[in-house]
Amino acid sequence: MSVPALEAVNLAKSFGGVRAAHDVSFSVPGGSLAALIGPNGAGKTTLFNLVTRLYEPDAGEMRFYGRPLAGLPAARIAALGLVRTFQAARIFPGMTTLENVLAGAHLHVRASAWRQMLWLPGARGEERELVRRADALLDLTGLLPFRDAAATDLPMGAQKLLEVVRALMARPRVVLLDEPAAGLNDAETAELGSLLRAVRASGVTVVVVEHNMSLVMGVADQVIVLDTGAVVAAGTPAEIQKNPRVIEAYVGKEAA
Ligand SMILES: Nc1ncnc2c1ncn2[C@@H]1O[C@H](COP(=O)(O)OP(=O)(O)OP(=O)(O)O)[C@@H](O)[C@H]1O
Ligand SMILES: [Mg+2]
């Protein structure tokens, strides 16, 4: 067995009386696509916040390719290759779509600050290469027509896709996506599904929080179901779809 890309061991986090996560354990193999599902307030975003250390866990441990993440600052975790998007897209204002996407690459620009300042050929070549990659990703996601528009003027769905593209520009080993299909129409959601498959095929591990069940069931290798801060089931899409506890957690709540 190889070391999982991402592993949570007995994670716990409470806010006042609310147990947003308790005793949460899961494991995501490298190169796979895991979906994190569950009703509103189940603790999905909290898990991302614990993994990326925006929140300090009350107990438990997170490991990234076997390396404990405890004590590491969020920026260091991103630099290691664990990159996330946010449920409410965080678009940098005053920048075009392309500039927003290029901002994601700053983690991996090899040219030194000095070389960039002096604008030596090495830096110029890297910049050109980054723009080429950005354009390819914008094309793949249908965002190319928005390339030079102010990113804050983009429709919500396009902003969500932009955030995914920006995360990919950082060349992550593991990417965490919080509801990337929110605000996307059916055609955009289908595009996103293809993009996620392509990302996985390129060797990047994907963990996606998503309410869109046809997207989840269509792309995930593993589905992890959360309810009131706990993992109630984990398995393949086929296993999850016929799991009575999942049906109860979902249908029960949504009917209520
Ligand atoms: N910073 C915080 N302070 C206080 N309570 C919080 C905080 N973050 C999350 N919570 C609470 O923890 C619980 C889980 O919230 P979380 O945002 O993780 O849910 P979620 O599964 O992402 O829901 P949604 O599908 O609506 O995004 C909720 O009861 C929420 O109110
Ligand atoms: Mg959430």
Image (tube, rainbow, N blue to C red):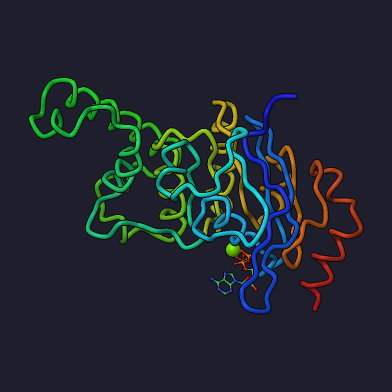
Where residue 44 sits in the image (x, y, percent)?
64, 59
Q: Which residue shows up at 44% across the image and 50% down it?
A: 74
Give the side of residue 94 with respect to residue 161, left or right.
left
Foreground pick, 212 / 115: 115
Residue 92 shows up from this direction: yes
State whether residue 117 is above or below residue 209: above
Displayed quadrant of residue 138:
top left
Where residue 8 sits in the image (x, y, percent)?
68, 47
Q: Which residue shows up at 42% across the image and 43% down it?
A: 76
Q: Which residue shows up at 71% across the image and 42% down it?
A: 218
Taking the image as four quarters, which one is ligand 2 found in?
bottom right
Where residue 66 sits in the image (x, y, percent)?
62, 34
Tell me how many marks there are.
Answer: 0
Quadrant for the C terminus, please: bottom right
Displayed quadrant of residue 190:
top right
Residue 142 shows up from this direction: no
Foreground pick, 97 / 15: 15
Give the side of residue 228 with respect to residue 91, left or right.
right
State whether residue 95 is above or below residue 190: below
Where residue 199 sits in the image (x, y, percent)?
54, 33
Quadrant for the N terminus, please: top right
Foreground pick, 102 / 64: 64
Give the side of residue 45 with respect to residue 22, left or right.
left
Give the side of residue 144 with respect to residue 164, left or right.
left
Foreground pick, 4 / 62: 62
State whether residue 229 is above or below residue 170: below
State whether residue 158 is above or below residue 249: above
Q: Which residue shows up at 89% across the image and 53% down it?
A: 243
